[in-house]
Amino acid sequence: MSRYAIGIDLGTTHCAIARTALDGDGTTTEVLEIPQLVAAGELAEQRLLPSFIYISPEAEGPQAVPWDSGREVAVGAYARARAAEVPGRVVASAKSWLCHPSLDRRAGVLPLAAPAEVEKVSPVEASFRYLEHLVEAYDDRYASDGGSLTEQKVIITVPASFDAAARELTVEAALAAGIEDLTLLEEPQAAVYAWLEQAGEAWRGQLSPGDVVLVVDIGGGTSDFSAIAVQERDGNLALERIAVGDHILLGGDNMDLALAYSVKQRLEEEGTTLDSWQMGALTHAAREAKEKLLGQAGAASVPVVVPRRGSKLVGGAIRTEVTRDELRKLVLDGFFPQVAADARPAQRRRAGLTQVGLPYAQDAGVTRHLASFLGRQAEAAGQEALLRPTAVLFNGGVMRSELLRERLRGTLDAWMESLGGSAVRTLTGGDLDLAVARGAARYGYAAETGSGVRIRGGTARAHYVGIESAVPAVPGLEPPITLMCVAPFGMEEGTAVDLPAHQLAVVVGEPVRFRFFGSSVRRHDEAGTTFERYPAGEIDELPPIEVTLTAEDRTEGDLVPVYLHAQITPVGTLQLDAVPTEPKRDDERWKVELSVRDAGPDDAGPDDAGPDDAGAEA
Amino acid sequence: MIPIYTVGGPAIEKGRLLACLIALMFGPVADPLPFFTRLWFSFVCALRVVVDGAFAGRVWAVRDRKPALPETSPGSAVEPEADDVEPEADDVEPEADDVEPEVDDVEPDADDEADLDAAGPPDVTPSREEAALLLLAVLQREGRLVDFLEQDIENFDDADVGAAARVLHAGCRKALHRLGDVTPIRDEEEETRITVEEGIDTGEVKLVGAVTGDAPYRGILRHKGWRVALQLPAPTAEHDVSVVAPAEVEL
């Protein structure tokens, strides 16, 4: 029997962990300190574990932690500190790679700039490493009270915009770290649970039926929007998540870089050039300056000093400053421009702030992305022009700044006013860096004890398989493709649907791939709905899915007609099975893999033919 | 399926952090005291445990955490009296009422009740010197303190020194506030007249000027004082703490 509900915020730039005692009244949620290396050979406890992995060279010796003196990688603050010094050996932003649309997420690709001798890790392994560190640090520090983390009820948060495969891979990483009693929770929902916990019973006074809460979550590397509607059900207030936005790779780190590059450019105009170490120091200083200027309304500028690198500190330092005008121009107007409600993100390529590989947002305007989200989701929620939030809950480190919250609120109010609506209220939560972990732990408590409010919502996307039509091949012309909805929007955990047999046939013994699609705006497609045409931008193609029929009771090479069976597991992942229309046994079915390994040369190895990948679920 | 997954080793250094914390709070464990000092001290402690509930609680806590401290290899605790005793403030007379010597082990039979879950291989608790070096390393890393102190700054103008001071100030301040809490000892405004009440800790308030008579004293608060509670990082087993900053070579 678990003693705690554990909430794990597995973030793009940092992780946090909180727990709530299951035998208490639910008010005992605590954020835990995480032991980690903060410098070479130096261990300290911090509430945030930076999501960085340092793969140290052999010459440096092991990265000893109290629970493993021979550890070869360091996770946490030391790894982050090494990122600027030895970029080829530090893994960062692994979570963004986990939901990369066109990448084998089990292939070793990180760090991108790794030299040949470094054994690269896959996005899945990176997630596993963070979870492994959390489990072992927890066990080392807290297991005397209630046992190992793996014996507790664990809630791991994922972005609302994570696709089905990224969710499944997160579960895979958690299982590898020994976490079995696991549920996934969307980050914005966790933020709402944290707010509910803090507000106590008073929340019923702050929201009423008809309210729509917009959750704006802007962290170090990503921005995420969700909308949650307040409804009345059987005389009680109930919450339902009605919309989630797309995954936007845009966050506080971009703002720091924008400031740093602006200062760098000014210095270069004055004839001072910076090397890469100084650029790192300048980015760091720019972040501090940004936080100071955002934090205090008075100061017109913050001095920035980039010291010399050697052991002489005095003399030769580069002195400059970040001014309020610069901050206003770059951060406030650059990232949070006051745009009209019908503004949309530009799709042009930007130079300067992009890194090879990740699909970074091409438009830095958070407000334009927000307008796009509200506009796209309006129709889905039955409102015209714009989804109209009545309240906003801010989350993520960037939103700690009152100045930025004020700007977003002002922009929202202007939009609502232009539509004849009223101003948007702000729901005030706790520490915006830790709310997601806290909320997750609190959710775990509520789910286990059956108490408190639950946010309903089900899956945030509808999923489709693409079936190619049987037409004569025409060079240069792709065969038309029919999309069939396999899992509708809003499927609840623990539910399942059977799909009509639809000319699907699979060859025994051969892996068969289907194209796979997702949509966050199509609400009304039911399981089995098919169509060939759809408006541009409504549906995104996801990595392909694959099924292999093992030959157990069948003859290799046979063609077997199948239909698909979709279910949302209690953990919160989508599971697709191929079921033969004429089964040889009662329970004959094969699992459809959502995250398929590429057969590229990079990852060919003995581990490729693992039983899980092509396993029959019979 | 993915062979790179490896499970870490067992939690062999359980309790290390706690041990370091205790060592920092109570100082390193001293060598055994002379027999008559211990005899006197056991009497003082016994009396104080009876009359001072808070003191008794602290002793209790120390006794409970005993297995996490290093000087407890089996067989060393053979003395019938308190065996590891360290007065907290060396410069205060032992008779003074407000001195609270930390007692590591009051009763020999306490060993029987030792926390079993903290048992493990002997821990490396930083000595007083190691703890100081670690702090220096943090202040150097984040605020370049040693660089600053080791440089001859005579021939630099104030602007250069000022620029360096900003680096020093920003880094060291951040490090200090991350590692601990800094609070003033007196809350009154400096340069105002205050009263130093009777029974105040003589370590907390330093009397200067014409010091005569007994408390309460009336005087002007010249400096409000600082109290710092630190939670230092711990060195890992193989780490050489005397390397406050490694030489850097760029390849």
Image (cartoon, coloured by chain):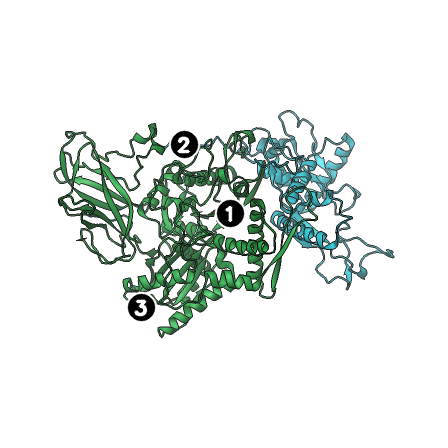
Q: Residues within 10 Å of mark 1 (few under 14, many from 20)?
A: many
Using the image as rendered, state which of residue A73 and residue A198 is in the foreground. Answer: A73
Q: Which residue is mark 2?
A: B4
The image shows residue A7, relative to residue A294, as above or below, that is above
Q: Nearer the viewer, mark 3 or mark 1?
A: 3
Kindly indicate whether the residue at mark 1 contacts the one at mark 3 (C-beta within 8 angstroms): no
Res A409 → quadrant: bottom left
Q: Which residue is mark 3?
A: A385
Separation (CA) of disc 3 from disc 1: 40 Å
Res A408 → quadrant: bottom left
User: Can the viewer see residue A515?
Assistant: yes
Q: Which residue is mark 1?
A: A48
| Chain B display color | cyan
Helix, strand or loop at disc 1? loop
Identify the residue at image location x=52%, y=40%. A79
Q: Residues within 10 Å of mark 3 (few under 14, many from 20)?
A: some
Identify the residue at image location x=58%, y=63%. A296
Residue A154, given in percent of the width and then of the height, sits at: 40, 44
In this picture, residue A358 sits left or right of residue B61: left
Chain of the residue on which disc 1 is drawn:
A
Upstream in the sequence, badge 3 or badge 1? 1
The image shows residue A274, relative to residue A327, as above or below, that is above
Separation (CA) of disc 2 from disc 3: 50 Å
The type of residue carrying mark 3 is Ala
Residue B84, given in percent of the width and then of the height, sits at: 69, 33
Using the image as rendered, state which of residue A504 and residue A553 is in the foreground. Answer: A504
Helix, strand or loop at disc 3? loop
Identify the residue at image location x=43%, y=58%. A364
In this picture, residue B122 sits left or right of residue A527: right
User: Can the viewer see residue A18?
Assistant: no
